[in-house]
Image: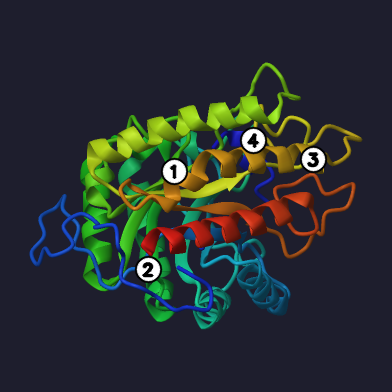
Amino acid sequence: MHYLRYLLSAVTILAGSGLLVISRQLPNATQTKQDDHSPVIAEPFPAPPILGIAINAHHISDLKLYLESVDQIAKIGANSLIVVTPMFQTLVDSNEIRYLPKKCPTAQQLIAILKHAKKRNLHTTLLPIVLIEKPGEKDWRGVIEPTDWDAWWKSYDNFIDRFVKIAVTADVDLFSIGSELNTTESQINRWTRIAKNVRQSFPGKLTYSANWDRYDKIKLWPLVDIMSVSSYFELSRDDEDAPFEILRDAWIKERDLLLKTAKQYDRPLMLSEVGYPSLSSAAAFPWNYVAKDGEQADHAAQARCYEAFFAAWTDVVVDPTNLAIGFHCYHWDPYHHGDSRDTGYGIKGKPALEIIRKGFEDIRRQAADAKQ
């Protein structure tokens, strides 16, 4: 995702039916001995399609709000929850990653949220991200350049260990070993070691969440079980008011390219984040959530983008013959409720929420019909 999404860094199968064994075969599912590049798949895995919602877990002053949010996510028909949570480095060239109590949740809070999601029959994913505490105008995790890579990786290893312990305690289904760390992705030996170390203690599956503009350029997909993509594709850069048909066709083009890469690496494809801010520029620059001074929320623009997404993806995620296993809509905001000043990605209280609810319902119905 573009740096602007995290410029303000201060700041998900079937519900009610339990977990089913996956019907689309994951790679090497019967493998009993692994090498450095071949995953061993834990069983069982929930059957696609994955219909999820993401929630950000930064500093939490009221845990009850998050537990209630999980309940609401389950009620709209989601069957999966992805919890996005930060670790911080001071600057893009810093060598140390730190836990900031005023900006991060506690381990106990994360465990409580994830365990509550399991009680609601939600598949769970834990996705730790690196945020920059003091970012420059174009600084974000995708452009980090530590002055000492060895020191940075040692620090990153330590934080991944911390999150793995949380994931194991909370019985998480899927763990992301990284997200949008563009400048690290060529360091395959480092990622190989991390994936291998995580597998020693985490019994679930692993993923990595690549940025939307370079998922086809990275070579670490053989290290993980599922290919995840942070999907903030620019659908219409030249026309912020582009009609639904244009947005749908743009999504179809991106969808086909995503599936091509998934086939190349023989990995199931999950869209870890699909989101749009409530801004007039949502279709053009979905990665940019920063509103201009005095700009009012444009919930219709957000809704139109979600309509295009479901039109492009419903038939694909229903089809058991392809590698697309599902997606997570970004995100559920416990603190905002869709008023005229709510320009963010949150869907609560906005027209997009009903589009997503109906989209989930349509996919579940079509998937059930396809099995008969």
Q: Position of residue 372 (x, y in %)?
A: 38, 64
Element type at mark 3: helix
Residue highlighted by disc 3: 300
Task: State left or right for residue 58 relative to residue 25.
Answer: right
Element type at mark 2: loop
Residue highlighted by disc 4: 286
Residue at (33, 54) in percent of width and height: 154
Say what amino acid the circle numbered 1 marks.
Val
Q: Position of residue 349 (x, y in %)?
A: 80, 58
> How far is mark 1 from mark 3, CA to CA?
25 Å
Residue highlighted by disc 2: 46
* Quarter where residue 233 is shown: top right
Say what amino acid the circle numbered 3 marks.
Ala
Does the image show residue 54?
A: no
Does the image show residue 111?
A: yes
Direction bottom: furthest residue = 119
> How far is mark 2 from mark 4, CA to CA?
29 Å
> How far is mark 1 from mark 2, CA to CA?
19 Å
Dot 3: few (<14), some (14–19), or many (≥20) neighbours within 10 Å?
some
The numbered disc on residue 17 is none
Residue highlighted by disc 1: 229
